Amino acid sequence: MSFRYFSFAVYTAPGVEEECLSLQDGHGVDVNILLFCAYAGVVARIMLSAQDLAAIDREVAGIREGVIVPLRTCRRAMKQGIAALAREQAAEAKSLRDRVKDIELAAEYLEQDRLVAWLASSERGAADTSSAALGANIGLLLSGHARGGRNPPYPDNLARAALSRA
């Protein structure tokens, strides 16, 4: 199963989008890396190390910080700005915002491609169970986003959706 298909199937499962956006906006978690941790655990049955996560983050930091985050910021600002426009202007501006959203999604796919390339180039042993690898990978990622000694909340809906794809 491809990472793109897996991530779409998991992200669109009930409650997952909300969990992902909460982790992204509230704790700085890269949603593609979160989904990749699930994919690596469930599909590839790989337990990632802290060094792996650091390498993965370095691999995608440029596209995330240089392209995805600025596009997301622009799209979100446009949403607020469109609400203040007259109806006829709002329709045109919404069409423009939709194009920005499409470009943002294309950039997200580029990030996913880099994650898949990293996985293909790495050699890892398989974990005993996909659920153990999933839990370990997500737990390790979240521990890197801890604040005040507390990890962000574990994405239970995402974990259930990911395991259902095993």
Image: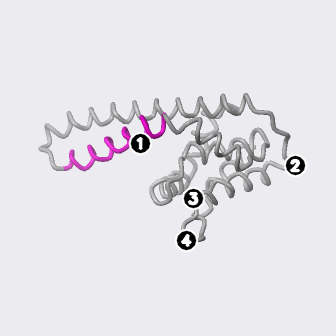
Q: Are marks 4 and 3 in contact (CB under 8 Å)?
A: no
- Residue that badge 3 annotates: 145
Q: Residues within 10 Å of mark 1 (few under 14, many from 20)?
A: some
91 left or right of 98?
Answer: left
Looking at the rendered structure, the kind of residue marked 1 is Val
- Residue that badge 4 annotates: 148
Image quadrant of residue 66? top left
Tell me: residue 27, above or below residue 109.
below
Near-viewer residue (114 or 2):
114
**Alpha carbons under labels 2 and 3: distance apart:** 26 Å
Closer to the chain start, of discs 2 and 1, is 1
Looking at the rendered structure, the kind of residue marked 4 is Gly
Closer to the chain start, of discs 3 and 1, is 1
- Magenta: main secondary structure equals helix
**Alpha carbons under labels 3 and 1: distance apart:** 18 Å
Looking at the rendered structure, the kind of residue marked 3 is His
Identify the element where label 4 is drawn.
Answer: loop
Q: Position of residue 52 (x, y in %)?
A: 70, 43
Identify the element where label 1 is drawn.
Answer: helix
Q: Residues within 10 Å of mark 2 (few under 14, many from 20)?
A: few
- Residue that badge 2 annotates: 128
Instruction: Name the residue rendered at 55%, 71% in the picture.
Output: 148
Instruction: Name the residue rendered at 38%, 42% in the picture.
Output: 72
